[in-house]
Amino acid sequence: MSPAKSLVGIGVDSVAWDRMKRFLASHSFQFTKRLLVPSEQKAFQKTARPLQFFARLFAAKEACFKARGGSWMEGETGFRKIEVRMKGRNRFKIAREFQTEGKFFNVRDGIAARVLIWKKAAP
Amino acid sequence: MNEREIYSKIQECLAGALGIEAGEIRPESSLVRDLGAESIDFIDILFRLEKAFDIKIPSGELFPANLLNENGMVQEGRLTPGGLKALEARMPYLDLAEFAKDPQVSKLAEQFKVQMILNYIRERVAKGIQSPSA
């Protein structure tokens, strides 16, 4: 039987390809990696599709801020407090949370991420 | 670097990040309400400012970082009097006079104006603070 859980929140965010392309064209990896934890930095350096990879990560982290009730205003340290673990092409999890369920969706001009975050229910 | 040069560089940073003409940018422009900035734009703006002025902008110095998550700062979606005071102390570059009348957290980002960035950069340049790598 799975443990009792309660929903912390649901977050949704989307990123337009054009906007992300402009961002990546303007900033070197040295800058971009400031938003990523080491495991994400490694994967980002290896990927053959940096635009798609970084846009997914960014949307997932933004969705996580929203699910937790936080905001981008936490700045780069806020982004680095969230570790996104890709699960195949269209799903992801957030590390160190009790339970999460993340999914990517193609939208007209970009990518959207939706995440549900649960915590262990009080006994 | 004089005031005009600083402002012109800030305009360039904002225009590049937001994909707009420098002429559309005025000191009183709200980054969100008037210039359409979103979260990725704020990150982009920070990185561009760091490069343009050769400074490191610590997390939470230009935008309020974790302040809103601290205990006692927010009640029912509004900054408490203590929260407002802390915000003023943490962000002396931000004019909070209008926001203080109805301090809804969801409206805070609308208060971030070009003038706020100008105030911040002017002070950093005056103090001559360079990036750690400089």
Image: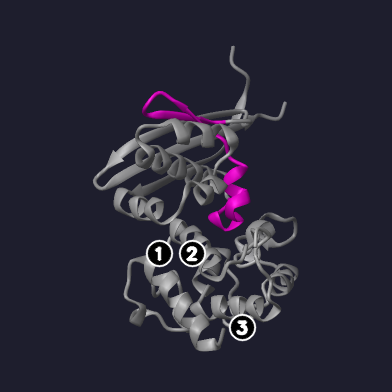
In three-dimensional space, the C-alpha distance between marks 1 and 2, rounded to whole angstroms, equals 8 Å
Region of the chain picked out in magenta, as a range: A70-94
Marks 2 and 1: in contact by CB < 8 Å? yes
Where residue A46 sits: x, y (%)? 44, 31
Where residue B96 sits: x, y (%)? 61, 79
Q: Which circle, 3 or 1, is nearer the viewer?
A: 1
Chain letter of the residue carrying label 2: B
**Where on the picture, by quarter, is residue A38?**
top right
What residue is shown with label 1? B17
The residue nearer to you, when weighing B108 against A96, is A96
Q: Residues within 10 Å of mark 3 (few under 14, many from 20)?
A: few
In three-dimensional space, the C-alpha distance between marks 3 and 1, rounded to whole angstroms, equals 28 Å
Whether residue A36 is situated above or below residue A87 in the rendered picture: below
Whether residue B97 is situated above or below residue A98 in the rendered picture: below
Instruction: Please check whether the numbered discs 1 and 2 fall on a single chain.
Output: yes
Amino acid on which disc 1 is placed: Ala
Magenta segment includes A81: yes
What residue is shown with label 2? B48
First reached walking from the N terminus: tag 2 or tag 3: 2
